[in-house]
Image (cartoon, grey):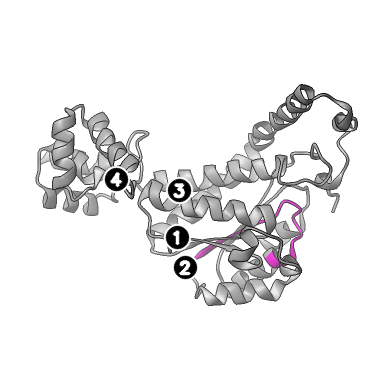
Amino acid sequence: MYSTTEQRNPETLKIDQLDTLDVLSLINQQDQSVPYAINQPELLEQMSKIVVEMTTTFKNGGRIFYIGAGTSGRLGVLDAVEIVPTYGVSPDRFVPLMAGGQQAMYEAVEGAEDNADLAVQDLKNQHFQPGDFLIGIAASGRTPYVIGGLDYAHSLGVKTASIACNKDALISQHADLPLEIIVGPEVVTGSTRMKAGTAQKLVLNMLSTTTMIKCGKVYGNLMVDLKPTNQKLKIRAKSIIQEATGTTAAVAEKAYFEAHESAKVAIVMLSATVDYQSAVTALINNDDRVALAIAALLKK
């Protein structure tokens, strides 16, 4: 495997001799190539297949696992934990696993990423099973911990995907749906927390967000299933109700409380002029999608 992430970048060979402004500008120039590396027809097509698997898994009650080491593992954790408040998802539906566990979020855990058996044990500890879905994340594309997890998933008949930043990555041979985002050499040689990390974050954003949209967590472009865990989110939930229905702030707030602090249910209640239980039932009967629930109620 030719590892472009470990090659020297010819455009940054003298970066240590530049003044501060030029260093910042050069890093920014390099970062601008990342979205273009992702915006390739074959990659987008592969991502759409991954989203289908993620959506099917989620709708059927299965869990979506991320597994990685170092920066890749931390990015999986970041994406998974943010899904919870943003889309009102239970914490056990997106499960991030990182080589070395929680300690590795803050410091390197020696040998963890090289231990394939550790991934198997971590998955077993989470009762990983058929019906779940696993995404392996490794910038280099050869992390043993990630490969061990992918192989264990296959032994159970669980479908998998992978995200790497090298062509012909080793983990691609161990995943059903491999992604290879070729971002080229890093600004600082081998520092894959930079362009490779940015690429992985963008891809995870795309995959999880599209999955949540397909699972009815978004109405228009509003996060109608957000979990109002703090004052900021409570205000946002009421604002979402107001935006979606065109009502006043006072009416939106009243509906918010009548809907048991669910922006989604409140929107259906106001849009179709129905009570709480009717709105909940309509959502259940219409794939939990606001637009479909409103349309069904208005037909009656």
Residue at image position (71%, 61%) is: 108
Distance of mark 4 from mark 3, alpha carbons? 13 Å
Element carrying mark 3: helix
Mark 3 in CB contact with mark 1 (< 8 angstroms): no
The answer to whether one can see residue 218 in this image is: yes
Mark 4 in CB contact with mark 3 (< 8 angstroms): no
Q: Quadrant of residue 39?
A: top right
Q: Please provide the residue range marked out in magenta.
A: 131-145
Q: Which mark is residue 211?
A: 3
Distance of mark 1 from mark 4, alpha carbons? 17 Å
Mark 1 in CB contact with mark 2 (< 8 angstroms): yes
> Can you identify the residue that label 1 sits on?
57
Residue at image position (68%, 60%) is: 107
Q: How many marks?
A: 4
Q: Residue 24 location in percent, x, y?
A: 73, 27
Q: Given the image, on which type of amino acid does mark 4 rest?
A: Arg
Q: Residues within 10 Å of mark 4 (few under 14, many from 20)?
A: many
Q: Given the image, on which type of amino acid does mark 3 rest?
A: Thr
Pointer 3 or 2: first along the chain:
2
